Amino acid sequence: MNLPKDPVMLLSVVNTYLRDYHSTLEELCNDADLTAEEIANRLAVIDYHYDARQNQFR
């Protein structure tokens, strides 16, 4: 899976994948061949953080 570099676009894609295809961030990371830390760090730049209860970045 090729994820966008732009954090705002990444947020949209990641939350869509979490909502529609993956029940956890870990599942998404396995498909994207990235670590949760890599995704979290890229989204922290725009002050979004993973909420496991909601299974989305907020």
Image (spheres, rainbow, N blue to C red):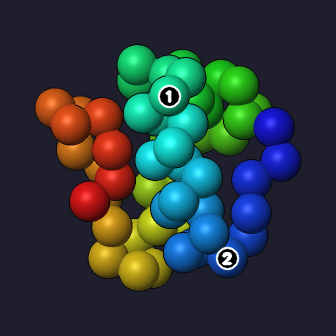
Relative side of 13 to 43, left or right? right
Residue in the image at 71% along x and 25% along y: 31
Relative side of 48 to 12, left or right? left
Q: Is residue 54 above or below residue 15?
A: above
Point out which mark residue 6 bears.
Answer: 2
Q: Position of residue 47 (x, y in %)?
A: 32, 76
Dot 1: what SS?
helix
* Quadrant occupied by the N terminus: top right
User: Label 1 sits on what residue type?
Assistant: Asp
Residue farthest to the bottom, as pictured:
46
Residue in the image at 62% along x and 69% along y: 9
Whether residue 58 appears in this view of the structure is yes
Residue farthest to the right, as pictured:
2
Relative side of 48 to 54, left or right? right
Point out which mark residue 7 bears.
Answer: none
User: Label 2 sits on what residue type?
Assistant: Asp
Point out which mark residue 20 bears.
Answer: 1
Name the residue nearer the viewer: 7 or 15: 15
**Residue 34 lies in quadrant:** top right
Q: Is residue 9 above or below residue 23?
A: below
Tell me the distance, in whole angstroms, between the alpha carbons under discs 1 and 2.
21 Å
Q: Is residue 48 above or below residue 46?
A: above
